[in-house]
């Protein structure tokens, strides 16, 4: 009876989750298709899309890889292991998490525009991954994190070692390095209040000119940015959306049939 109830409840939940995730990606795909691609020099206030290379506005170093970055998301997690070397369920604990909010430039052959990632969706995958443990001869061997990572954790007052040795940890980082080609769709604004909001906490150098900014509006669709060009980004979104909807639908139907057979059997 227990599993019959589980299958009955899980089927519509999985179908609903697949629909929500898939349709949100389809909405983003349709947004990209309906927004004409423009050169930076042709941008106007309102919804626009642009493709170019990322350039730093504020010098930044990624916390784990110690490389230059225009935008970065990083996370460190501790974990526990079972006797057979598998990660113990529900033992993953996030002890460090950061996301840069400094603006950066997108540059094409006609010029460059300042992009504010705050409140936007930067769709990037992990570019750096490090684990300080290995499974050797039926035993987990844990080593101290590299110097650069330890410096980051020390600065954030994150504990990574106890008296009996270092903690097993996983470090992931998703970074946009200068020179990365990206596509972005968002709201372009020449209003001084929007520019000031993007530049909050930043002192401009003499000669710096920021006539407009590409950002997320207070209301409406948020900034969306991903590595690649308009074709690769839009086709990737469409493929992800259709795959998610299809898989969740198949799983939900199978679970529903199992539940039906159990209830009527």
Image (cartoon, rainbow, N blue to C red):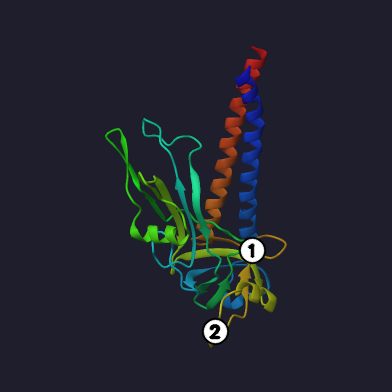
Q: Quadrant of residue 190?
A: bottom right
Name the residue tied to disc 2: 208
Q: Quadrant of residue 221?
A: bottom right
- Report helix, strand or loop for mark 1: loop
Residue 89 in the image: above or below residue 48: above
Check residue 35 in the rendering and tell me which mark sits there, or answer none. 1
Question: Which quadrant of the rendered structure holds the C terminus?
Answer: top right
* Along the line of sight, the residue nearer the viewer: 167 or 42: 167
The residue furthest bottom is 206
Q: Is residue 225 left or right of residue 148?
A: right
Residue for point 64% across, 49% down: 24
Q: Is residue 15 left or right of residue 80?
A: right
Q: Are marks 2 and 1 in contact (CB under 8 Å)?
A: no
Q: Residues within 10 Å of mark 2 (few under 14, many from 20)?
A: few
**Image coords of residue 172 (percent x, y):** 44, 52
- Report helix, strand or loop for mark 2: loop
The residue furthest top is 265
**Image coords of residue 261 (percent x, y):** 63, 17
Residue 5 in the image: above or below residue 174: above
């Amino acid at each position: 009876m227990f599993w019959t109830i589980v299958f009955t409840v899980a089927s519509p939940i999985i179908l609903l989750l697949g629909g929500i995730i898939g349709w949100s990606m389809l909405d983003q795909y349709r947004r990209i298709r309906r927004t004409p691609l423009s050169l930076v020099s042709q941008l106007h206030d309102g919804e626009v899309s642009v493709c170019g290379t990322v350039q730093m506005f504020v010098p930044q170093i990624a916390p784990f890889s110690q490389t230059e970055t225009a935008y970065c998301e990083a996370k460190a997690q501790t974990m526990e292991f079972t006797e057979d070397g598998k990660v113990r369920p529900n033992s993953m604990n996030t002890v460090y998490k950061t996301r840069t909010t400094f603006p950066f430039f997108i540059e094409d052959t006609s010029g460059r525009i300042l992009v504010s990632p705050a409140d936007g969706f930067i769709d990037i995958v992990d570019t750096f991954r490090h684990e300080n443990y290995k499974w050797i001869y039926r035993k987990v061997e844990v080593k101290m994190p590299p110097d650069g990572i330890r410096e980051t954790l020390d600065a954030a007052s994150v504990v990574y070692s106890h008296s009996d040795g270092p903690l097993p940890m996983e470090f992931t980082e998703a970074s946009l390095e200068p020179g990365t080609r990206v596509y972005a769709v968002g709201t372009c604004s020449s209003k001084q209040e929007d520019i000031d909001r993007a530049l909050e906490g930043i002192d401009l150098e003499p000669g710096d000119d920021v006539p407009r900014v590409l950002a997320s509006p207070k209301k409406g669709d948020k900034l969306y940015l991903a590595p690649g060009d308009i074709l690769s980004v839009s086709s990737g979104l469409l493929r992800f959306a259709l795959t998610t909807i299809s898989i969740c639908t198949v799983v939900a139907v199978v679970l529903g049939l199992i539940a039906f057979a159990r209830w009527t059997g």
